[in-house]
Amino acid sequence: MIPEQHARRDAEQTTEFALSLAHTLNNLLQVVNGNLELLATRVEDPQLAGYVRNAQLAAQQMTELADDLQDDALNRS
């Protein structure tokens, strides 16, 4: 295999891995976000509600990172 073909194959594999990773992360984060949303409606303690909000913000940031990873991978292909 010539170097150009090897580099192209490696780039394709990296793109496929990034897309798969982003997809899996988004699926898991959907579960986390959904459960946090349900929890937020049931928490009455203000301190606990603050913890839930912090977790929701962190999960949202992770969702944005996964979306950025997917966008970057799609732009490279």
Image (cartoon, helix red, strand yellow):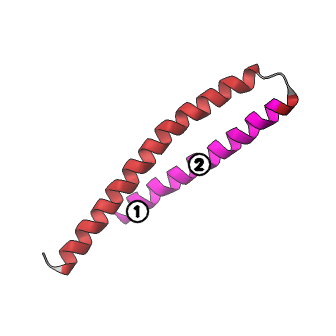
Depth order, front residue of 75/49: 49
Specify the quadrant of the image occupied by residue 17: bottom left
Q: Nearer the viewer, mark 2 or mark 1?
A: 2
Query: Residue 72: x, y in percent?
Result: 45, 61
Label whose residue precedes the other's in the sequence (2 or 1):
2
For the C terminus, which image quadrant?
bottom left
Query: Dominant secondary structure of the magenta stretch?
Result: helix
**Residue 48 placement, left or right of 59:** right
**Residue 54 placement, left or right of 19:** right
Question: Helix or strand or loop: what does disc 2 sit on?
Answer: helix
Depth order, front residue of 50/65: 50
Q: Residues within 10 Å of mark 2 (few under 14, many from 20)?
A: some
Query: Residue 50: x, y in percent?
Result: 81, 36
| Residue of label 2 | 62
The residue that appears at 80% across and 30% down in the rendered structure is 48
- Marks 2/1: CA–CA distance: 20 Å
Q: Residue furthest top?
A: 42
Q: Residue furthest bottom?
A: 3
The residue that appears at 74% across and 22% down in the rendered structure is 41
- Residue type, mark 2 in image: Met
| Residue of label 1 | 75
In magenta, the rendered stretch is 48-77
- Residue type, mark 1 in image: Asn
Query: Residue 2: x, y in percent?
Result: 15, 79
Residue 33 part of the magenta segment: no
Up-down: is 15 above or below 52?
Answer: below
